[in-house]
Amino acid sequence: KDVRTEIIRPAEPTLDGVQVLGLLRLRLEGAELPEGVRWLEAEARGAPATTEQLRLWAAKPRCDVRAAGRALARVRAAFGDDAVVTARLRDGHLPEARFAWEPLGRLSLPSPRPAGTRPLVRRIVDRPAPLPPRPPNEPDGWLLRGVEHGSVSRLVGPYLLSGGWWRLEVSRDYYFAEMRGGEIFWIYYDRRRRRWFLQGEVA
C-alpha cells in the first residue's frame, strides 16, 4: 500500500484548531488520490509559546505581520511550499544571475530608509524575454511591448557587457528604451544570437 505524507506548517505556533484544519483542507483539496483514502493519521508537533502569544491584550501594528503570515501559510498549503519565495542577492556576471529564489521563512516588519527623492527601481525579469526586431526606421514605429505601450521615442545607450569566456561567451549592448507612453524598459541586443531581449523595467 502507498503511504503519502504531507507537512502542514502554520505561519507560527498556534492553538487555533480551525486555522490548522483550514490549512489541511487546502492541502488535501489539491492532492490527487487516484486510489482513494483508507486511513488518515495526523501528528502535531508542539512548540513553546512566545511572550506575545501569551499576552491577553497586544497592540496591533499598522502592518499585521501575523495576518500576512497566515495568508502565506494558506498559499503554501494550497500550492506547495515552493509557491512562496523571496529573492536573495548573489554574485553573478549577468543581471539575471545576480539573484536566486529561496523559500520565504518568517515575515518581519519592513524598515524603510528615508529618501529625499523617490529612487528609480529596476525590475528584472526572471528570464529575458525575446523582443520583436528593430525596424530600419527606428525609433519611430518600434513596438517593444505591443500597441498599448506605444512606440520607442528614445534609446539611451549602449552600455556594453561582455565576458563569460570561461563557459559561454556573452556580448550584449544594453539600452534604456523610453516609450511614448512614459514607460522605460531595460533592453539589450545579444550579438551572438542577433536578437533583442527585454531584461526589465524601470519604475
Image: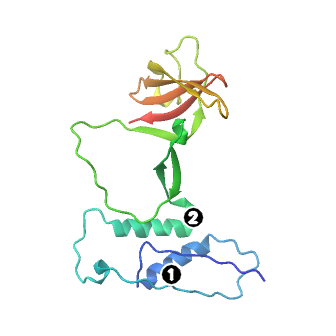
Residue 147: where, in percent of width, then height?
A: 51, 27
Q: Is residue 170 above or below residue 52?
A: above
Say above or below: 86 vs 17.
above
Q: Quadrant of residue 166?
A: top right
Task: Report the side of 156 relative to 113 (left or right).
Answer: right
- Residue sitting at 54 percent across and 32 percent down? 198
Instruction: List x then y, in percent, for residue 164.
Output: 61, 31
Quarter the C terminus occupies:
top left
| Label 1 CA crowd tier, 10 Å (few <14, some 14–19, many 20+) | few
Direction from residue 59 to residue 82 in the image, left or right:
right
- Relative height, residue 23 to residue 174 (above, below): below
The kind of residue tagged 1 is: Leu
- Tell me the number on the disc at residue 21: 1
Residue plotted at (76% across, 80% down):
2
Q: Residues within 10 Å of mark 2 (few under 14, many from 20)?
A: some
Q: Extreme right residue here?
A: 1
* Element under disc 1: helix
Which residue bears the numbered disc 2?
79
Q: Position of residue 72 (x, y in %)?
A: 45, 65
Per the model, the C-alpha gap separating discs 1 and 2 is 16 Å
In percent of the image, x 29 and y 62: which residue is there?
63
Looking at this view, is 139 or 158 the one in front?
Answer: 158
Amino acid carrying label 2: it is Phe
Q: How is the image coloured?
A: rainbow
Secondary structure of the residue carrying tag 2 is helix
Q: Indicate which disc residue 89 carries.
A: none
Of the image marks 1 and 2, the number of the one nearer the N terminus: 1
Quarter of the image with the N terminus is bottom right
Q: Position of residue 79 (x, y in %)?
A: 57, 64
Q: Residue at x 42, y 24 (%)?
A: 178
